[in-house]
Structure formats: structure tokens, C-alpha cells
Amino acid sequence: MPRSRTRGGPRAGTDDAGAGPPVPPGVARGRAARAAVGAIFFANGAAFATWASRVPDVRDALDLTPGGLSVALTGLAAGALAGLPLAGLLVARIGSRRILAGAGIYLGALPLVGLAPQLLCLTGALTFFAITNSCVDVAMNTQGALAERLSARPLMGGFHARFSLGGVTGAAAGGAAVHAGLNPETHFLLTAVLLTTLCTVATAFLPPDPPGTGRPGLALVRPGRGVWTPGLVAFCALMGEGTVNDWGSIYLRDVAGAPTWLAAAGFAVFSAGMVTGRLVADRIRAGTGSHRYLFGCAALAASGAVLALALPFTWTSLTGYALIGLGLAAVVPVTYSHLARRTPGSPGPAIAAASTIGYVGFLAGPPIIGALNHAAGMHAVMVVFLVLMIIVVALAPRLRDDLAEEPRP
């Protein structure tokens, strides 16, 4: 016989008396969506780190010269850039959820890279890997923005922290694979199977795309008034990140006088700052708003550059790198979130357009810095970075449309 209940819930003294209130369906969906989107971000970071961790082995297996490896890596960069406009078109036409349901196509490119028998095939495989990665990247950022909308609070920083965690995990697994004697083909195949399984399960819990997705006429978004400012912020942030990635260790050794082993640790300090900044970004942004948050982030990163310039010693420069990492951590994620709120009907194409602008900075930054170094010396690294952050500080007040400034439902 069923137990009798009062209108207010279980009767005192029954087994259910200590149970908490039921979780509302909307809250449960929001939690499931956050977990699913986080899993996709993790898988993407792990997949790319898997390739990056085995570059020396792939090079040695094909007996590539430095020039040959550069050709293959050019295919990777070109594919990433070419894939961004395509990603915007696909997200508009078929939806971000369907793209992520096909993430196995992207992950399936990993074994193709490992199986490439010569340079031409490797370049083609890396180009395909990069194009599909761009599609997944735009789709997962679109899903991140939709999950924010569903939860009515900032989440994008945490999602990008999961991407970084996936990168750390993928790199660690790559080191373990090398130690175990696994060749790249086997390592890449096992990774692809595991991550495809994770993405397939996660796809079932992703938020639905906006109702207008897939209607005729949706196509590429050309940068306009609503895209140029976020795009320029992304350009400055990614150019700054590429500058520190490629020239930071050299600055530590040649300007700050760090020993070689400690100069190599500069990237680790910078990366640790990035992960930490992404982990705390959502909580801070919820209380400040996007434009104030971006202003503070750029100012913090600029202070790190000033410290490395004014006191060019090993430990002060390393401290500056930590501040730079903390400041840059969530600039791009918050910019994408802002764009999604400006274009609620079709966030994917807008994110793709801004990503394209930003990625141009990521690719162009290191060569530009190299030319300036030749003309003006190694101090140009931090001078250029400082100028980029000043530009972000100037642009930040124009990004005012964010979650923290709207009442919660």
C-alpha cells in the first residue's frame, strides 16, 4: 500500500523525511549541459595535445628535415585559418550540436596523421585535422554560450579551463605512451576511440541550438560593427599569447639572464597562470561584468609586461609571466560569450568571424616580433605585448552586454 503523503511532501517519520527538495528539471538540464559542454572542451584539448606530444616521433618516423616539418606545420596553420569561416557556415546551417555529434570525424583525423607515409600525406592529414578542429572549436564555444544562457551565469572561463586540463592530460598521456613504447599510430588510434566515445555520450546532453538555426539564407558573417570590436580584442589577446609562447623563453634567457633550464620553465609559469585565471574567471566576472573584467585582465597582463621590462631579472620576469598568464586567461572566452549574447539567434557565425580575426593575430604575431627583434632588440617582445594590452584596455568599455548586467530569471 502506498504511503500517505501530505500536500507539502512526505509525512514526518517516513523514509523520505530527510530527503532534500527535488531538483527542478531546468536546473538538472543546466547541470547536464554544463557537464556535457565541459567534456567536449576537455576532449578537444586532449586531442590536440596528443598530436603535439608526438611531433618529434612523427618527424623521426618520416625522417623530416626542419624545412619539411615546417611545411607540414604550415598545413596545420592554414587549415585552422581556413576552417573558421567554414565552421561559421556549418554552425548556422546545421547547428553546433550536430557538428559536435560528428566530432568523430575530427578525432578520426588523428590516426590519419600517425599513418601518413610521407610528407605530402602528412601535410594533407594535418590540414584536414586543423579544418575539422576549427569546426569543433567554434561549435563547442557556441555550445558554451548556450549553456551560459541556460544557466543564466558565466561559465565560459570554466569551459576553457577544462580545455587546458585536457591539454595537460593529453600531453601526460603522450609522455606515458612514449615511455611504454607505443608508436604514434597506435597511440593516436586509442586516443581517438576513447575521446570519440566521450563526445558521443556528451552530445546527448548538449543544449539545443537557437530556433532559427538552419533556416535558408544563413551564411558567413562578415565583420561588422558588432564583430570588429570583439574581433580586435581577440586579435590582441591571441597575438599576445603567441608572442609569449614563441619568444617568452628567449626573453628570459637573453634579457633576464636566466639559465637555460629556468628559461624553459617560463612557459610552464605562464601556462599555470592561464589555467588558474580560467578557473576563477567565472566567479569574478559574475560580480563585475564583462567589460570591467576584461579591463582588469588587460591591466593585470600589462603590469606583468611592465615588471619584466622595468626589472629584467629572472625571478621578476617569471613573476611577470605569471601575471601575464592570469590576465590573458579568459579574455578570449569572455569575448566569445559577449558575441553570443549580441547575436542570440546565430552565435556560431559571429564567433567564427571574431575567431578568424583573432587567429590572424596569433599567426602573424611571432613573425612580426621576430622582425622587430632584429631591428630593435629583444625588448621589443614586451613592448609590443604592452601595446596590445593597452589596446584591450581601451576597447573593453565597449563590451557591456553580459550576464552580470542582466537580472536573473
Image (tube, rainbow, N blue to C red):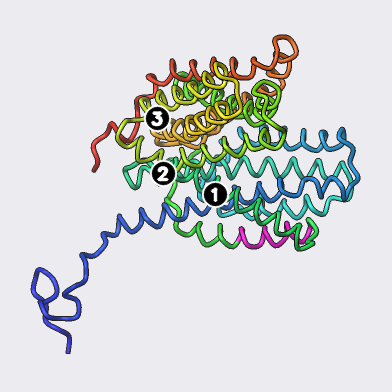
Our reading of the magenta stretch's main secondary structure is helix
Amino acid of disc 1 = Leu
**Is residue 374 left or right of 198 when viewed as pictured?**
right
Residue at the extreme top of the image, as rendered? 375
Name the foreground residue: 10 vs 29: 10
Name the foreground residue: 186 vs 200: 186
**Is residue 245 left or right of 340 when viewed as pictured?**
right
Residue 350 shows in this picture: no
**Is residue 312 left or right of 341 when viewed as pictured?**
right
Amino acid of disc 3 = Arg
State the extent of the magenta-drawn residues as a range: 185-196
- Identify the residue position indicated by label 3 in the image: 342
Which residue is depicted at the point 83% across and 38% down?
A: 69
Quadrant where the C terminus sits is top left
Tell me the mark number nearer the camera, choosing from 1 and 2: 1
Q: How many marks?
A: 3
User: For numbered disc 1, what is the local secondary structure?
Assistant: helix
Tell me the mark number nearer the camera, choosing from 3 and 1: 1
Q: x, y percentage for residue 256?
A: 64, 23
Label 2 CA crowd tier, 10 Å (few <14, some 14–19, many 20+): many
Which residue is depicted at the point 11% across and 81% down?
A: 4
Which residue is depicted at the point 61% across and 58% down?
A: 195
Label 1 CA crowd tier, 10 Å (few <14, some 14–19, many 20+): some
First reached walking from the N terminus: tag 3 or tag 2: 2
- Identify the residue position indicated by label 1 in the image: 165
- Identify the residue position indicated by label 2 in the image: 146
**Mark 3–mark 1 CB contact (< 8 Å):** no
